[in-house]
Image: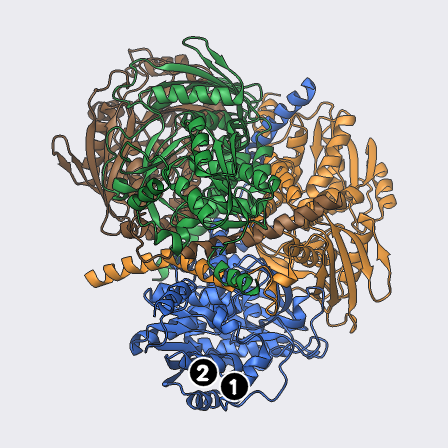
Chain colours: A brown, B green, C blue, D orange
Amino acid sequence: MASEAKHQTSSKHCGSTEHGTKGTVVLAYSGGLDTSCILLWLKEQGYEVIAFLANIGQEEDFEEARKKAVKLGAKKIFIEDVRKEFVEEFIWPSVQANAIYEDRYLLGTSIARPCIARSMVEIAKKEGAQFVSHGATGKGNDQIRFELSCYALYPEVKIIAPWRLPEFYNRFLGRRELMEYAQKHGIPIPVTPKEPWSMDANLMHISFESGVLENPKNHAPPGLFKMTKDPEVSPDAADILEIEFKRGVPVKVTNLNDKTVHTSALDLFIYLNEIGGKHGVGRIDIVENRYIGMKSRGIYETPGGTILRHAHLDIETFTLDREVRKIKQQLSQKFSEQIYNGFWHSPECEFVRQCIATSQEFVEGKVQLYVFKGNVYIMGRESPKSLYNEELVSMNVQGDYEPCDASGFIKINSLRLKEYHRLQSKAVSKN
Amino acid sequence: MASEAKHQTSSKHCGSTEHGTKGTVVLAYSGGLDTSCILLWLKEQGYEVIAFLANIGQEEDFEEARKKAVKLGAKKIFIEDVRKEFVEEFIWPSVQANAIYEDRYLLGTSIARPCIARSMVEIAKKEGAQFVSHGATGKGNDQIRFELSCYALYPEVKIIAPWRLPEFYNRFLGRRELMEYAQKHGIPIPVTPKEPWSMDANLMHISFESGVLENPKNHAPPGLFKMTKDPEVSPDAADILEIEFKRGVPVKVTNLNDKTVHTSALDLFIYLNEIGGKHGVGRIDIVENRYIGMKSRGIYETPGGTILRHAHLDIETFTLDREVRKIKQQLSQKFSEQIYNGFWHSPECEFVRQCIATSQEFVEGKVQLYVFKGNVYIMGRESPKSLYNEELVSMNVQGDYEPCDASGFIKINSLRLKEYHRLQSKAVSKN
Amino acid sequence: MASEAKHQTSSKHCGSTEHGTKGTVVLAYSGGLDTSCILLWLKEQGYEVIAFLANIGQEEDFEEARKKAVKLGAKKIFIEDVRKEFVEEFIWPSVQANAIYEDRYLLGTSIARPCIARSMVEIAKKEGAQFVSHGATGKGNDQIRFELSCYALYPEVKIIAPWRLPEFYNRFLGRRELMEYAQKHGIPIPVTPKEPWSMDANLMHISFESGVLENPKNHAPPGLFKMTKDPEVSPDAADILEIEFKRGVPVKVTNLNDKTVHTSALDLFIYLNEIGGKHGVGRIDIVENRYIGMKSRGIYETPGGTILRHAHLDIETFTLDREVRKIKQQLSQKFSEQIYNGFWHSPECEFVRQCIATSQEFVEGKVQLYVFKGNVYIMGRESPKSLYNEELVSMNVQGDYEPCDASGFIKINSLRLKEYHRLQSKAVSKN
Amino acid sequence: MASEAKHQTSSKHCGSTEHGTKGTVVLAYSGGLDTSCILLWLKEQGYEVIAFLANIGQEEDFEEARKKAVKLGAKKIFIEDVRKEFVEEFIWPSVQANAIYEDRYLLGTSIARPCIARSMVEIAKKEGAQFVSHGATGKGNDQIRFELSCYALYPEVKIIAPWRLPEFYNRFLGRRELMEYAQKHGIPIPVTPKEPWSMDANLMHISFESGVLENPKNHAPPGLFKMTKDPEVSPDAADILEIEFKRGVPVKVTNLNDKTVHTSALDLFIYLNEIGGKHGVGRIDIVENRYIGMKSRGIYETPGGTILRHAHLDIETFTLDREVRKIKQQLSQKFSEQIYNGFWHSPECEFVRQCIATSQEFVEGKVQLYVFKGNVYIMGRESPKSLYNEELVSMNVQGDYEPCDASGFIKINSLRLKEYHRLQSKAVSKN
């Protein structure tokens, strides 16, 4: 017993667990080949496995996945619809923040992980499971996002990451070995050939990477995108939307063409995805810097999120004081980096979220925009809380403004510049 | 004489100068109604006036403007083609920086002012003029950008800003008074009615503001844009470009459709404007925060600059180390703010430019992109200086990478989070 | 009449107001020569003057000042004790923030101005005064801090700053003219010669500047300091204090030598001034950058504030998460700059104060320190909310920590560095 | 055999290497008990060991250490005097940056590691050693600083960190086992009992941690400090120094008491240590946040570095433009964090060092200060490159300054604040 315990301790060094005895694992199960095999493999190692599948907006036959998990021998199966909380607690704060990683990536995958992990940890605690497991690879960001969330919310948890365990990855060198393993255990294997890249989908976006995309010079293959129409074949007429915000969050979307209105969070976000998708909005092809320290190439489509980014940026600048905006912008950069790196459930991210939420108190009003051929064009905005003062800014109305004050403003601002010039002239004249 | 001098001193308080005696002014003259009247008015006040007109890429009949200035009684007229230096010394650093104000504005007007002012100050010094003058209004940013540049480069200069002088703006309350004044002095007045907004054009962009645009809810009127086609009527076929960068600056643009190649700075920038314009790229409608402390609404079209922003962002992320990029990004934010506020010619902006230039040493390579219906889509990139390591990132190749290392990385990163959880649990359990 | 009107117009440009007619001014009155003369002068211009004097902890014979104001002809006199609110609403937030300007100045004057101005504006509003006035000079920071506060809290107010009005400063060229003016009006003039520098005192600190101190090379004259003993003659035995914090604010100070205890905000701050003063703590001699754009030399003594800075820094680092601390530190820098520049009553400063207050929730515990010969030495600290984990950090206890994890952490962190080396080697080998 | 192989595989995951066969290790050897045992142990594992000992200013009998290494069976021994490069290439950039970690720690250990590692890597490359090894523990910062430097400069290197290897740390559970091991191999063991804390010394500072200091409440034991006199017994008379800077680096130190002068980098730094030490300057007791994610308590004495920090801050603020200073200050924070975390040899740190060096071009002049009873007091400063303009700042001289300009400056700055007040009043009145 003691030596067993000790053995566990030492092998724990690399994240694995030595088992053979009972123990319950909650597995982040997708119904696909990888996590099906992992489920089997975990059982083979002597664990009891609870399959957990989050409905976070991906296209999936959840009933089919449930049946398959039963067949695989899962002790219990939880399929949780987290779409509403995903929108309200993860997407909305990102919209408030104008969160963006390295100026381009809207963080669709990054914010999904802490949402899924939170839900999974709740189940693990409720079910008394000491372990959680997932099918993320050992080079990516998702393992980090997933595990940091788990450790933060359930510090005693032990994590089994098969793709980082030599005993697993040396056995399953590729897709072929997984297929064989599945077949041997009577698991239905995918009949359609896998596409030569990997894909991750949720309500916010779909990401594409790996395979043929790994060469950063290769163009995206035709037919890659799923959520968005190719702008070449998207409609020749725009949709005109009015999006209303309260506290920095969209509360109403009106299509001014057909007068349809959406007001609940989940509902309006799905609608924005639909409109954005129809017009091919939100496609990007980037190289990004992973937290793990390597560069990787990713292609993303984020239709609704892209529309909201344009609209929120607009209403925010309209209603927020300039200097508050500047400080909030820097906090948003921290926030974006925290999200990308997997630190959603961290003291610093909690802190920054609170600060950003504070900044949004007066971010309220309506933005009119049109969506057309892959683009979002702002047309106008109005707000009861705006700091915009038409009379003050007007060239034809003096307002509460003395033009002469500007002279003093400029002269005082030039003092430093003149002193610097004086110093430099001195430097030059001495040479 | 003494009382005259004293009088000058006291009125100087608000930026004006009392004159009646000789003195030479270099006037930033555009050939338009305002600066034509200012030229006359300055002469009326007893100054000798040198008209200065910079060709910074705006559409203008420079010969016509010259003739008009002669007729107005300018002592000398300087028409300087500053387009090449505008591209190489002002646009290029902005491209290197990915300079952007409040997440949207590409600073086309802001970078033009210090370029024009520098050229004007050189003439003022050469001609021994103690004064410079301009037609910018008292509520805008341009007066600041213009004057801070002048003070920085020529600290002893005195600036006459008629639109801030009560004796001027109380006399010329509107366009009508200017027209009458012009007519009275036999100056040709514009025959076409002025559009109900104001416009400022240069090689980088055209900006539109004031008039009907002052109501932030009003949509941009049809026919507003000049440099860019409406995406609704732009071509149905994309142009595919390859842009090559060295040290963060474009050195070659190849149109992969027709194989045309442009390599000189000015030439390739004009070409990017042409392609961007043809496809309706770079239109934005924003509310922005002026340095003077008020919000204003502006509409901009920046075709070539927008293409370059996309391309540079891409090649930069591909070649710059993640952490260098992050620090550089913060410097760029400072830079953008400095530019917007008029501090191009300042010690801090000089410092930041040097730092940013340092960061661009290895920003080198080629980006392929296509331009279509108002959008720029990155397709792929390659670089001899990339930090991208295809083998390292590949999911199928282990490379010089132990998956197990990630476990340690994650666990060490989770230490803080666990401690925080411990503290919070304690806090909760005590309550 | 016309010339009068014109005079009004032009002088309005420089911050003055309609005179000759009735109007009520609240004057920030100190009882000294300058503001006594200003009081008289304002009456001479036709204003009714309300004298306002804040007790913000400076040494002052307030009764004497009141009598003098009566004699000067003030319509009303308000002497307000704002010490408690100064400590609780201005000093405490600065302590929480570790506010410091340019790495050295603890902002003692800067935080006093918005406190005084707020109190003054309340009186102006209550008394229906349309004007406020002050004796600050035209080159300093205080005019800005004072006036921005007034404009922010009472936007319609008009401000009369005599030292910026030519009609005032050309008449009172120096101290001699003020003395003569006072004498002529039967006002008692100071009998002791003024010290050859100026001084500003409050509960937080005393500042010294101007006069002989203007030459930055000159050493501070002996006898300058008032609140603090010269360390050369300060006691040879230390005082040992224990300071207890809750939410980042001191709530109890115990002198471990004599067991005296102070708990109320004002009381304990006065006590810390006493102990700090006795041991010569908090003297600095600096050159700083004024908001107005010039460098100036200032000497400060801040005994209690300096002790609190040491103590708060210590308990904060002990209880705050590393990354929260880092973000909070950057907010503090903004905060310090806002305070120094006069923007206490601004949207951005309000925002930052809220964020910083949020960060202080768990900043709780006790710090032991000793104060000796101008220095504050931290001896130890304890906290019920600490994130310090003695078992985890101990070299002799493994704790919940696998040393091997550090290997993975380091290796993953080195990935970027290796890639960069690879690139550089390539660059070198090509040359 | 098989189990051996398996052992190798699994242990490789945690940073160890192939043993049993030949291979050369360069060991960072100190002559102390730990690294002596490691040397033996490495040989026992089948390595050839080169002992490397850097003279970085610590008190050490280098000849004795060499003899001991011979006795231990080192293949070669390198004792390198890196003091000059330590001062010029590591301390000086830190002085230029005013580098400080978490507002208090002057980074004395942090900057020593990359200096030692660089020297060691040079030897490893020259000697064809594939391995380096060190005696740093698995919970500290030094392992990271050391190893990141090695990986950055010699990416192919393999690192053996015995204190992270179970086969080592499970065998040598404490000091007793090390002593026994040493004795068994005939190695002289320390006769004086070890102090109940650990210590790390170099030219910049001595740090103390661990043992009795691990309890953050415990006061530092008497007799702890080595470089600095206790201020209670330090001299009753100050030393007055004049420090001259060029490009932000001290180039001359004059003691104004005895007129001694020091000009070479190493020489003057040693002298400042002497003076600072004599007067008890630079002692701190802090809790800091390790990169590894835990808080730890450290006590430091940094006499010369503390004097230089005061002096450099002073001359820098005197000569640097305000806005340049602010940007540079933020870069310095990055720099400090990079240093602390071990990233001296990284692209981002290289970049930041270049930027900071750029900022120091005009940081030139003389600072007078006195050192007394643990404190450094600035007395005055002068510079040929100062931006200080005595005439401009003087209250008695108008200079090139119109007081009235300040009115405009303030009013323009108040525009935003007034608008915000308007909005808030509206918000309130609606409630």
Q: Nearer the viewer, residue B112 or C204?
A: B112
Q: Are marks 2 and 1 on the same chain?
A: yes
Look at the image and tell me whether residue D15 can be seen: yes
Pinpoint residue A342: horizontal percent, then vertical percent: 42, 38
Marked residue chain, label 1: C
- Is B413 on the left-hand or right-hand side of B211? right
The amino acid pointed to by label 1 is Ala
Q: How many marks?
A: 2
| Residue B74: assigned label | none
| Residue C40: assigned label | 2
Q: Nearer the viewer, residue D117 or C390?
A: D117
Disc 1 element: helix
Figure quadrant of residue C431: top right
| Residue C182: assigned label | 1
- The answer to whether A2 is drawn above or below residue C350 in the figure is above
Residue pictured at 39% horizontal, 29% vertical:
B302
The amino acid pointed to by label 2 is Leu
Mark earlier in primary sequence (2, 1)? 2
Decide: few, some or many residues near mark 2? Use Cα within 10 Å; few <14, some 14-19, many ≥20. Answer: many
Q: Nearer the viewer, residue A135 or B20?
A: B20
Figure quadrant of residue C308: bottom right
Tell me the CA gap for discs 2 and 1.
8 Å
Disc 2 element: helix
Q: Are the residues at dot 2 and dot 1 in contact (C-beta closer than 8 Å)?
A: yes
Decide: few, some or many residues near mark 1? Use Cα within 10 Å; few <14, some 14-19, many ≥20. Answer: many
Residue pictured at 38% horizontal, 56% vertical:
B166
Pinpoint residue B160: horizontal percent, then vertical percent: 48, 49
